[in-house]
Amino acid sequence: MELIDRAAGYSDHIAIVTGDQSLSYSDLLTRSAGVASCLLAGADDLGEERIAFYLPGSIDYALVMWGIWRAGGVAVPLNIAASTADLEHVFATTGVARLIVGDGAPAHIHELCDRMNVAVLRVADLGGSPVALPGIAPDRRAMILFTSGTTSKPKGVVTTHANITAQVRTLIDAWGWGEDDSIPLFLPMHHVHGIINVLSCALWAGARVETFEKFEASSICARVADGAYSMFMAVPTIYVKLIDYLNGLQVAERQRICDGFRAMRLMISGSAALPVKIHEDWQALTGQVLLERYGMTEIGMAISNPLNGERRPGAVGMPLPGVEVILAGEDGGVLDGENNPGEIWVRGPNVFSEYWRNSAATEDSFTDGWFRTGDMAVRERGYYRIMGRLSMDIIKSGGEKLSALEIEDVLLTHPDIAECAVVGAPDDTWGEAVCAAIVPAEGASVDEASIRAWGKDRMTHYKVPKRVMIQASLPRNAMGKVTKTQVKALFS
């Protein structure tokens, strides 16, 4: 495993900081070998046993993940915000027999494990003298992450060690990672954003990761003001929260934090579309031009704005090195040229191997070796622009394919709109009507008529929402993302 083998080259460098504890690369190797030895319990190889763990991003998280890998197991990181029903689905799907937890795991976790006959192991008890560890071939299964399950039950996405190596390698080159880099990690640790883009890339490069159990603007901004980081990765929601937090500070304190952001060599946004307005607001505050990229659980990262070159607001850039991307029409034909919206198909060593124990879904997701992402995009002046999920963000109205994300971008430029979600709802005349759920800005008052009138001056007539609903908040999932299925139900 090249990711783990490389750690010896950084020896006494600090790999991870969690609170007042730090872990060097040499300690990471030694202690993860101890975890692996405990998990083996005298066996030569775990033989791809699935082992789940319920931990936030931390030193313990890295030790457990590496320990599972080094023992020949398959890591199953759990969403620590997931419901009992969701966790039960993961346990049943993967067939895990062991779960690793930290101190203070909630009672419902122990109750679920008792009911499903899953043994609970404490991180603190996994240690001791390392034994001989098995050799792990690159094509061995390494990890199972679960899809968001927006249109069906979440599926277990299997990535091999070779897949992970390919995903990391391309980002190391594309984003210029080096051993002098340092980065905060506050993202949920059951997605590729936190696991691959931050933690694994940093550990590959010999960089330093400072972990936080969750995002908290004040504590993270204090470290930013201290100049602790050279890189920063977050989702659009986090940038919205940071903008609100910074704008609420006294001028001197805001400036000190903004200077800390300004000094970073790279700031990245991903996991959801970044509204152009947020891109512009962040640049105005910090001077940083956010780098937006595109990826998903099944493929890691596939497309990115460049490290050096134009980072175009509203676009995700060009295919990453080693990743093949095409746009396909409804008939499966390749769409050449520009300004032709089509589904993103991806091929390369980064693409996952299978959906766990779901051969039908696996076969249905590939055509001639190309993974069909279910996302629609268009090429414009060489860059890809994401239009949205075919199942939710593409509205078929009056014979046109409309991007809900584009309409949301325009609505967010309204000074009295804090948040919005655009969906399509059945309509006898249009097939689907454009509908918008809107959260007013604090202290503002908006109504349907004024929003529609405002939109007519800024959007072509078929993009102006036919129905507008004013909401105090938008429904969100455990990741904090707006749940468009529930938004759509508001208009049914």
Image (cartoon, rainbow, N blue to C red):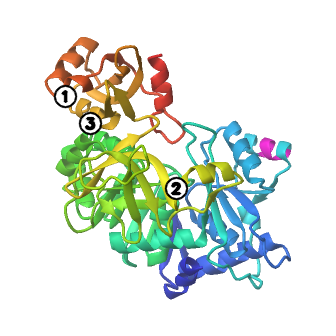
Indicate the position of residue 397 as horizontal and vertical percent values: 34, 25
Q: Closest to the observer: 64 or 435?
A: 435
Q: From this viewpoint, is residue 227 visible?
A: yes
Quick check: 254 left or right of 26?
left
**Which residue does the image show at 24% across and 64% down from the upper left?**
263
- Label 2: which residue? 367
Asked if 229 appears above or below 327 in the picture, the reply is below
Q: Give the range drawn in magenta.
A: 110-114
Instruction: Say which label, 1 or 3, has the lower sequence index.
Output: 3
- Label 3: which residue? 409
Instruction: Say which label, 1 or 2, has the lower sequence index.
Output: 2
Quick check: 65 left or right of 98?
left
Indicate the position of residue 96 as horizontal and vertical percent values: 77, 55
Q: Closest to the observer: 241 or 142?
A: 142
- Structural crowding at the residue carrying mark 1, measured as other residues with C-alpha within 10 Å and reported as few (<14), some (14–19) or many (≥20): some
Disc 1 is placed on an element classified as loop
Mark 1–mark 2 Cα distance, whole angstroms, equals: 36 Å
- Label 1: which residue? 459
Q: Closest to the observer: 407 or 7?
A: 407
Disc 2 is placed on an element classified as strand
Instruction: Say which label, 3 or 2, has the lower sequence index.
Output: 2
Disc 3 + disc 2, Cβ < 8 Å: no
Q: Quadrant of the N terminus?
A: bottom right
Asked if 436 appears above or below 57 in the picture, the reply is above
In front: label 1 or label 3 = 1
Q: Which amino acid does label 1 sit on?
A: Met
Asked if 114 appears above or below 119 in the picture, the reply is above
**Which residue does the image show at 50% across and 29% down from the upper left?**
485
Disc 3 is placed on an element classified as helix
Indicate the position of residue 302 as horizontal and vertical percent values: 41, 61
Mark 1–mark 3 Cα distance, whole angstroms, equals: 11 Å
- Structural crowding at the residue carrying mark 2, measured as other residues with C-alpha within 10 Å and reported as few (<14), some (14–19) or many (≥20): few
